[in-house]
Amino acid sequence: MNINVRKISTFVEEVHIEGGKRADKPITTVVVAAVLKNPWAGQGFCENLRPEILRIAPVLGAELTRRLVAVMPAARVEAYGKAAVVGVNGEIEHASALIHTLRFGNMYREAVNGSTFLSFTNTRVGPGALLSLPMIHKSTTGQRSHFLTATFQIADAPGPDEVLVAIGAADGGRAHPRIGDRFADMAEMEGEKTPA
């Protein structure tokens, strides 16, 4: 894996009680994040990002996927997402470049038998920022119970010339979902329409 990775961090959270009520089953969230040298650092404005995307994204996607499913087996994954943040010397486009390619996302999607897009965050931050990784259901985009956000931080990352790339998964939705889904809203709103 010769893509200048400085470190890889894994975060696991289990929610047992939410709102003072015990969940039917603990909800586990896993995030695997890699911190690597920004391949475009120090080059000034780079018009063509594609060569580095092709070199890095598939390797990074495969490694993060391998590590995530080692912690949470693919059959347990119900929700998923991704995030990329660039250090203060980089462009947000640098972070976006590494995750917004099928060469990165398809490996993860296929490994966990997903069919929806991977919801995402891409932004610029300093080291130690609290990061958000949004998730949706892996096959039903309107299932609001699985609109989740994993938060994590790495004290020394991303450095000014680094990119932090992460994928996340959950083995369930929120502990006590009670707001319905998009499809129920759509049906209700269609029923509320009155003829002109």
Image (tube, grey):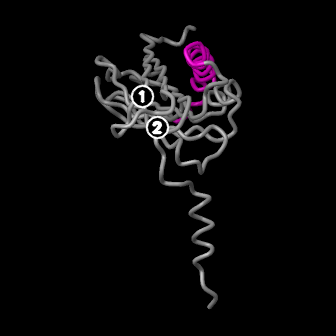
| Residue projecting furthest to the top | 2
| Residues marked 2 and 1 touching at CB (< 8 Å) | yes
Q: Nearer the viewer, residue 35 or 13?
A: 13
Per the rendering, the mark at residue 15 is 1
Q: Secondary structure at mark 2?
A: loop
- Mark 2 Cα-neighbour bin, 10 Å: few <14, some 14–19, many ≥20: many
Mark pair 2, 1: CA separation: 8 Å
> In the figure, 32 relative to 132: above or below?
above
Determine whether 96 is above or below 12 in the image: below
- The residue closer to the viewer here, 82 or 135, is 135
**Left or right: 66, with 154 as reference point:** right
Left or right, 127 with reference to 14: left
Q: Position of residue 152 (x, y in %)?
A: 37, 26
Q: Residue 111 location, x and y as percent?
A: 69, 24
The residue indicated by pointer 2 is 175
Residue 97 image position (x, y, % from top left): 53, 33
- The quarter in which the N terminus is drawn is top right
Q: Residue shown at 67%/27% (left/top)? A: 112
Magenta residues?
47-72
Residue 24, image x and y in percent?
50, 33
**Magenta residues, dominant SS class:** helix
Q: Residues within 10 Å of mark 1 (few under 14, many from 20)?
A: some
Q: Nearer the viewer, residue 99 or 16?
A: 16
Instruction: List the single residue furthest toward the bottom.
Output: 196
- SS label for mark 1: strand
Quarter occupied by residue 87? top left
Q: Amino acid at mark 1?
A: Val
Q: Is residue 68 magenta?
A: yes
